[in-house]
Image (cartoon, helix red, strand yellow):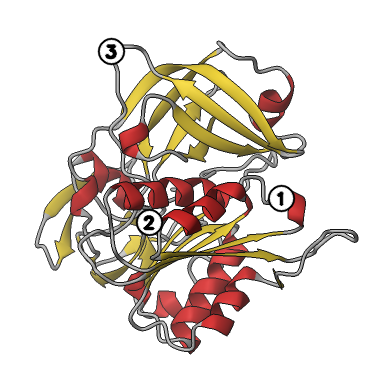
Amino acid sequence: MPYQVTIQPSGHQFTVEDHETILEAALREGFSLPYGCRNGACGSCKGRVLSGQLDYGVYQPNALKDAEKAQGRALFCRARPLSDLTIEAKEIGAAKDIVVKTLPCRVEKLEKRADNVMVMKIKLPANERLQFLAGQYIDFQLKDGKSRSYSLANPPHDGALLELHIRHLPGGLFSDQVFSTLKERDILRLKGPLGSFFIREDSDKPMIFIAGGTGFAPVKGMLEHAFAAHMDREMVLYWGVRSLKDLYMAELPQQWVAEHPNFSFIPVLSNPEQGDPWQGRTGFVHEAVMADFANLSGYQVYACGTPIMVDRARDAFTQTRGLPEDAFFADSFVYAADAEIAPAA
């Protein structure tokens, strides 16, 4: 049977049908709650249940720890109500008026930037334009009914072509196709924009961006949007990769450093190859941030990468560096059973 959910502190109410999760129903009725992967792995949709009963659904333990469950938290992308509910969640005004569309698109350009990274640019029909926020992602709708999701790497003001950074995972349902049979001018189908990973522009706090591998894609779009909007907030990018060859677009943030005095770039290699001409930072990328910042209480952090990277950064920053939980924004890569990436970058 349908149940009513009340969002606090706004007091907004919506109805959840039997087949829906809390997040699905909220988005259907026009209430923009935070979310990322939509399958219980990234934790972006986490909120508090103030009253009522629910089925928590299937999720990854790292996304919702037992201690958080005991505090009344749930993942709204997986949870379904078993009674009327009152939940506590921060609604996102910036995404409220953006329309999610399903559209055909054409592959305009394929550029291999590293052994396992393809930069794909796609073009929409002449009469269509995708309105999105920098950092959001799209789903490719595949012929077998499955979907694969990738972050938009371009800012909204530069939307004539949509840019995606696709990492090749052997056996990947979509990335194998991108690296083998996909050609320029091929037609694909997309749905978007999706997600709540974007800059909160109602704040003047300095921002730390953490990208792991192709997690650079949405961060690139966010930073290019910030530069175009002449944001004067301090911005620092930490880009963590395994070896030097994985910094597949390093010349771009180096260019930003020369052009924007409020921007800094710190690349971090976790496993430099023998022979890499590297004198820079090494180790885990979140540890580089911790070495540089003893107190993050006045910052916002935007992180995109693997779930383990995002989880380590969130835990370390909030527990040992004073970062408020509501100042950490993330988009996690989630690996499907066939080894393909979903939902981002």
* Residue most extreme to the front: 258
Of labels 2 and 1, earlier in sequence is 2
The residues tagged by marks 2 and 1 sit, at their Cα atoms, a distance apart of 37 Å
Give whichever of 152, 66 is nearer the camera: 152
Image depth: mark 2 or mark 1 in front: 1
Q: Please give the name of the residue rendered at 38% of the width and 56% of the height, measured from the top-left corner.
A: 79
Q: Which mark is residue 127?
A: 3
The quadrant in which residue 30 appears is top left
Q: Dot 1 lies on which element?
A: helix
**Residue of label 1:** 246
Amino acid at pointer 1:
Asp
Crowd rating for badge 3 (residues with CA inside 10 Å; few <14, some 14–19, many 20+):
few
Q: Quadrant of the C terminus?
A: top right
Crowd rating for badge 2 (residues with CA inside 10 Å; few <14, some 14–19, many 20+):
some
The quadrant in which residue 313 appears is bottom right
Image x and y of residue 150, in percent: 51, 38
Q: Please give the name of the residue rendered at 43% of the width and 77% of the height, measured from the top-left corner.
A: 68
Of labels 1 and 3, earlier in sequence is 3
Q: Quadrant of the N terminus?
A: top left
Give whichever of 25, 304 is nearer the camera: 304
Q: Relative to 228, is 109 above or below?
A: above
Q: Can residue 40 be seen? A: no
Q: Please give the name of the residue rendered at 58% of the width and 83% of the height, measured from the top-left corner.
A: 291
